[in-house]
Image (cartoon, rainbow, N blue to C red):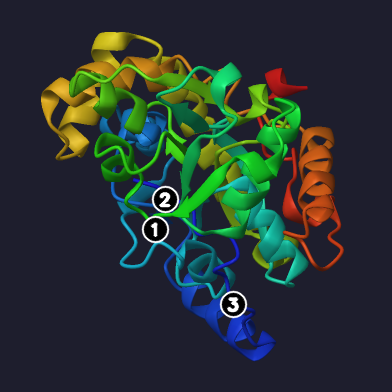
Amino acid sequence: MRRRSLLALLVLPLALVASGCGDAAAKGPSHLDLTLDWTPNPDHVALFEAEQRGYFADENLKVTLRAPADATTPLKLVATGRSDLAVSYEPEVLLAAAQGLPVQAVAAIVPQPLDSLISKRPLASLRGASVGITGLPSDEAFLTTILAHQHVPASSVHVVHVGYNLLPALLSGKVDAIVGGYRNVEGIQLAQQGVHPTIVPADALGVPSYDELVLVASRSRLAKSADYRREVRAAVRAIARGDRAARTPASALAVTRKATSSPLPFLRRSVPATVALLGDAPCLTVAAWRRYADWMRGHRLLKNPVAVTQAVTQAYLPARCG
């Protein structure tokens, strides 16, 4: 269920970016469209809490959560003014900034990596293993970093491009391990099928830590509109309240069950696992983004220089984030 589409963004003509801004402004200051990164799932629990418990309404906002028709479009929708906010991924936001898209992360939704190495073998036995990846350049960079961290020669590992069929490839025995699965999704799905692999998050295997999911706003609208800045700050406050409410397991499960179509047995495992990873959300740090951007440049995932402060800002976070 790999959701990230790193390097799939296309540079948009500046005229298109400019033309969309008026449409967004016409919606009125109290109405915000928020495009999710994927279909509603436990990763969005803080948003579900804010919506269902009236925290957005308390901030005089009417927020509509929308699943994207195409998972590669949320950042483009924000850049063109066709969505006021979006949920995306730190790597994609950095790439978008390098390509000149006027988008900026304003809060963390899930503040640590979910991508993991999921292996039927112990970490010490990766030599000679077959490893499935989607074929995205980011997966290849992850695997290169992981193997170097484990002192395993890349030549000793058989890499298999399995597309988005990561779970079937592992279950069928086509591969011994996968890179790109989520510990709170595929890891749980495997356990529910009687498989108990080794699961190690990417940042425990040499990849710099990063914010898996972030709330993204339009950088150009933030620069021009005091109303939009107020709305974004209010939305982040509401999501921060939702994040705190989600720390109560029964509440988190109830709102997620109402907002998604996932099977209840899966939610009973995935929701608590996700909540445990919320950490200090919605806080994020520019220094951590710089480290991850440097790693991306080192692996040629970022081909253009990027000013990290164009990709992320701490200006809209609660005071407790420092």
Question: Sequence order check: which comes first, mark 3 or mark 2?
Answer: 2
Location of mark 2 (residue): 3
Which percent across, then down, holds residue 42? 32, 31
Query: Hey, which quadrant is residue 228 in on the image?
Result: bottom right
Amino acid residing under circle 1? Gly
Mark 3 or 1, closer to the camera: 1
73 to 299, vertically: above or below: below
Quadrant in which the N terminus appears = top left
Dot 3 falls on a residue whose secondary structure is loop
Query: Residue 315 location in percent, x, y?
Result: 75, 40
The image quarter containing residue 51 is top left
- The residue to which callout 3 is attached is 10
Which residue is at 36% across, 54% downward?
164
* Any part of residue 219 in sight: no
Callouts 3 and 2 close, C-beta under 8 Å: no
Which residue is under mark 1? 163
Structural distance between the alpha carbons of marks 2 and 1: 12 Å
Local packing at callout 3 (Cα closer than 10 Å; few below 14, some 14-19, many 20+) is few
Give me the residue at 33% from left, 37% from top: 170
Identify the amino acid type marked 2: Arg
Q: CA distance from mark 3 to mark 1?
A: 21 Å
On screen, residue 82 versus residue 157, left or right, reads left
Q: Is residue 268 left or right of residue 18?
A: left
Q: Residues within 10 Å of mark 2 (few under 14, many from 20)?
A: some
Residue toward you, 187 or 45: 187
Q: Secondary structure at mark 2?
A: loop
- For label 1, the crowd category at 10 Å Cα-Cα, with few meaning under 14, some 14 to 19 and many 20 or more, is few
Three-letter residue code for mark 3: Leu
x, y percentage for residue 90? 63, 46
Does the residue at mark 3 contact the one at mark 1 (Cβ under 8 Å)? no
